[in-house]
Amino acid sequence: MNPFRMFLFPILLLVFTGGGIYAQGRIATPLSAAGFSKLTSNKDICSFIRQCDTLSHLVTASFYPLENGLEIPVVSISRPENKERCLRILFIAQQHGNEPAGMEAMLNLIAAFAADGDHEILDGIELMVIPQCNPWGGDHHRRRNKEGTDLNRDHLLIRAGETAIIQSVFRTFNPEMTVDFHEYYPYGSAWEEFGYRRDFDIQLGGLTNLNTSDEFQRLFKSYALPFVKNHLDRHGFSFFEYTLGDFPAGERLRHSTVDINDGRQSFGITGTFSLIVEGRNGKDSLYHLERRSESQYQTAMALLQFAKVYRNQIGEEVARFRDSHKQPVTSVALIQDHFKGDEILDYPLRSVKTGADTLFKVKAYHPCVKAIESVDPPLAYLIPKSDSMLVAWLRRSHIGCSDTVPADSGIFGFRLTGEEKTNFEGIPGVLPLISKLSMEDLKPEDFLMVPVQGIFSLKLILALEPRAMYGLATYPDFRYLVSREVYPILRVEKQTGK
């Protein structure tokens, strides 16, 4: 690193965290330099990160080019002198372009580590940050990217170039913990008419899909939630577990989705301790942005401190879960939904008229996720070589395949006998009705064999099974898979004589 780097970025804004992990100076981000009156453009983000890279030996940046001169920055933050095995952590922000506070928090985080100071929190931790996943959406303050894709609903299909970059960084870095930073909007008309609204500075969500680790869910509930809450309480920010549902309409409350097409669950089913942060959005883009970005920055710092304290438990469970999936798993939950438990939820909401907090006792609280339908996984799937859509999806997903189908394989398929209407997670849908077929007369040379093993085995099963509630066939691009007499994806279930 340039020994004269201190002269290349002379402006320092000293902000002390007052009871945080450590007192430190922060380099002025473009937002703070503009007096919190102007959103940070992708050009300014990348320029700022390049300066931080020049300034500090802890910060190393790379940039993935997109159209029109836009770039997705990827920032590595670590101590070169770390000798021991590090817990790898990936932070991503602004998948939705109209949620800027997470991005600004990541710039604050990068600035904090780039400034001179004591960075003991990095002992045993290697951090990777993608502060802005959706540059076009950020520059235009739009939720989706330029092509109209919601990036946080694209981690199964991987249609967008931005999502492909996120997934590429994930595969290369192979993190054991991920955090996805978002904002929720509490000012909708239904809440205003109801007279009360959510007013949490931060909501934190964990994994809900049953195909993820039970130990991760325990770590989240028993340790991460109270750890982050205590930190945010000390800094004057309100906090709650991430909770969804149309409360004003009397609908059930639950803890997010089991959909593997979003960033958190798509990482979680690979054996990653995966979380989502939902900060409070503003009435417009700049509304209380200083507080919004600071609350997310403090959440990021709390999660880093949590990871340092619990890194052995996280790392051991990641290794155990991933090792267990080197061979096919025993059962996979294809259809899941949320159910009531014995608990009544204490739900604090703020009065729209008076600003006073009111505690609601919610009986329609559905915190329990249960499997409605499961399947024993095959040894492999057979994909028709002629199906260009499926072959392209395998390539985008970097899922390996082979041209060789063992001659003694027991191969089965499904006859599509009809369809049924469904309503899981409150979302109307359709799933096929099926009956099993023995496939004896197929030509093996017409198929690619995709083994079901490794950390992406669960993703493969949940994508390719015809009855999977969030499988490929539930999306318009792949509806053709269930529009014929026989489902074209076959299962290799056993080998003759074995």
Image (tube, helix red, strand yellow):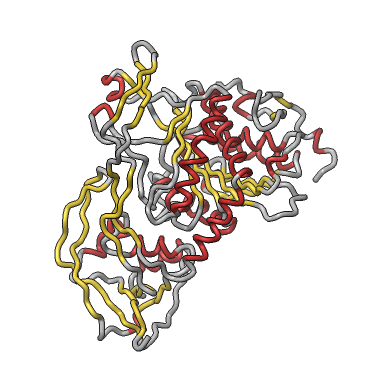
Location of the C terminus by quadrant is bottom left
Q: Position of residue 394 (x, y in %)?
A: 42, 66
In the depicted view, which residue is nearer to us: 206 or 93? 206
- Compared with residue 283, is residue 53 higher up or lower down, i.e. above or below? below
Residue 58 appears left or right of 368: right
- Where residue 24 appears, as percent x and y from the top left, is 72, 29
Query: What residue lies at 57% left-to-right and 48% top-to-bottom?
Result: 90
Q: Is residue 279 above or below residue 409?
A: above
Residue at 37% across / 19% down in the picture?
350
Looking at this view, name the residue that lies furthest to the top.
Answer: 354
Please tell me which residue lies in front, 268 or 50.
268
Q: Is residue 164 visible?
A: yes
- Between 378 and 90, the residue placed more toward the observer is 378
Q: Is residue 136 something that shows in the picture? A: no
Picture quadrant where residue 104 is located: top right
Q: Residue furthest front?
A: 342
Residue at image point 39% right, 76% down: 448
Percent coordinates x, y for residue 441 in the rendering: 25, 86
**Image coordinates for residue 343, horizontal then vertical, percent:** 32, 36
